[in-house]
Amino acid sequence: MLYERYGDAQVLRDQYPSMRAWVDAVDRLTGPGRIWGEAFQFGDWLDPTARPTILAAR
């Protein structure tokens, strides 16, 4: 979002190692089926566009 707003690629360079580490960690946790079923996850309840009634039901 910062890059899109301001066009400064430095933020991408600075954060690339942590972004790559996160993607690699998710890859390890999900396995070949790409389903995250065992370890802690936030899941879709963290969806900022979800309606409040949906959030309350979870």
Image (cartoon, helix red, strand yellow):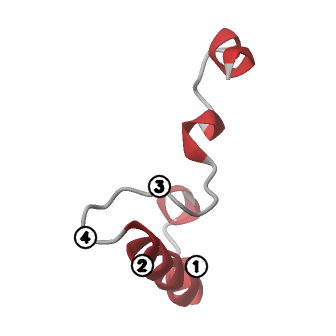
The residue carrying mark 2 is 28
Real-space Cα distance between discs 4 and 2? Answer: 9 Å
As helix, strand or loop, the secondary structure at mark 3 comes to loop
- The residue at which mark 3 appears reads as 37
The Cα–Cα distance between marks 1 and 4, rounded to whole angstroms, is 31 Å
Q: What residue type is labelled 4?
A: Pro
Secondary structure at numbered mark 2: helix
Instruction: Determine whether, in the image, residue 20 is placed left or right of residue 52.
Output: left
Residue 17 vertical placement versus 44 (above, below): below
How far across and how far down the image is residue 55, in percent?
69, 21
Q: Residues within 10 Å of mark 3 (few under 14, many from 20)?
A: few
Q: Which mark is residue 48?
A: none
Of the residues under marks 1 and 3, which one precedes in the sequence?
A: 1
Relative image position of residue 37 (x, y in whole percent): 47, 55
Q: In which quarter of the image is residue 41?
A: bottom right
- Disc 2: CA contacts within 10 A as few (<14), some (14-19) or many (>=20): few
Q: Mark 4 points at which residue?
A: 32
- Residue depicted at 46% across the width and 72% down the height: 29
Tell me how far mark 1 sits from mark 2, CA to CA. 26 Å
- Residue 32: x percent and y percent? 25, 70
Dot 1 or dot 4, earlier in sequence: 1
Which residue is rendered at x = 63% and y = 34% of the image? 45
Single out the mark in the foreground, 1 or 2: 2
Q: Which of marks 3 and 2 is nearer the N terminus?
A: 2
Density class for disc 4 (Cα within 10 Å; few <14, some 14-19, many ≥20) is: few
